[in-house]
Image (cartoon, helix red, strand yellow):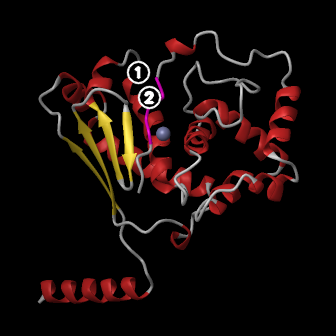
Amino acid sequence: MADYTLSLVSSIFLIVASLYGITCLEFIVINNAKTTPGGIRFEKEIGLKYAKEAMETTSKFIWNMLNQNDPKDRRVMDNVTMYISEYKGAEAFTQANKINVSSVYLEGYQGNLTWEFTSLVYHEMTHVWQSFGAFEPIMLIEGIADYTILKANYYPPLYAKPGMGDKWDQGYDFTARFLEYCEGLKPGFVPTLNKMMNITYKEEYFVDLLGKPVNQLWKEYKAKFGGKPSTKNSNTIRERRYSDRYLGY
Ligand SMILES: [Zn+2]
């Protein structure tokens, strides 16, 4: 009888949920590299439970940052799944709701792996939730993902300093610092730009939002932080190579 009542209640909930477009979102972590050194290190220093919690925590942070607290404002998906897999190359890459993390990268990382992994999840999880209707410009998409780790205070020591970089769409931390500057000019710039990129991307968006072309904004940004080196001296010894690529939805 109790079971019947329970199933009736859950059926009613599911009907109501579907009527209102509510979907239950699940975070899943699968270690497909359990027997490899990196997969073993993952279990020891991170673990499935922490990885799942990190996916949830970072998602909530990103929803807040991108003004997506209302589920209606974000992509509909019933799960986001992370795979720990043995492959060489990018430390991680994200495809739609699937995040792949390289066990080879985890094996070789020197330092606090839990911290590094969390930072990586902030970046990759941004790719899950951000807008990218046109799949470009890829370096702006990567810049927004690195803007997240800046705002979350999970950026590595060799992350670009304000004013660094040769062009606004250099990508990753260089672009993230420029976005930080734009956000300073107009609070809400980043979430609004992200929303506008839902269908397509146009350079005019910068004019629409900040009243100036992006190249002029970049010049003013560089002038503001004049005297700073445009590139890092030690670019090649960054803790993370930042070689992930968003592969499309
Ligand atoms: Zn990325």
| Residue at disc 1, secondary structure | loop
Q: Residue furthest top?
A: 233
Principal SS element in the magenta part? loop
The residue under the point 48% across, 19% down is: 239
Which residue sits at x=68%, y=17%?
231
Whether label 2 touches label 1, CB < 8 Å: yes
In magenta, the rendered stretch is 241-245
Q: Which mark is residue 209?
A: none
Q: Amino acid at mark 1?
A: Asn
Residue at x-position 31% and y-position 17%: 108
Which quadrant holds residue 86? Answer: top left
- Give coordinates of residue 46: x percent, y percent: 31, 33
Q: Secondary structure at mark 2?
A: helix
Q: Quadrant of residue 106?
A: top left
- Assess disc 1: are there few (<14), some (14-19) or many (≥20) residues with their C-alpha within 10 Å of its C-alpha: few
Which label is found at residue 115?
A: 2
Q: Is residue 78 magenta?
A: no
Name the spot of residue 186 as percent of width and height, x first: 82, 51
| Residue under pointer 1 | 112
Residue 49 rendering spot, x and y as whole percentages:
29, 44
The residue type indicated by label 2 comes to Trp
How crowded is the residue under tag 2: few (<14 C-alpha within 10 Å), some, or many (20+)?
A: some
| Quarter of the image with the N terminus in it | bottom left
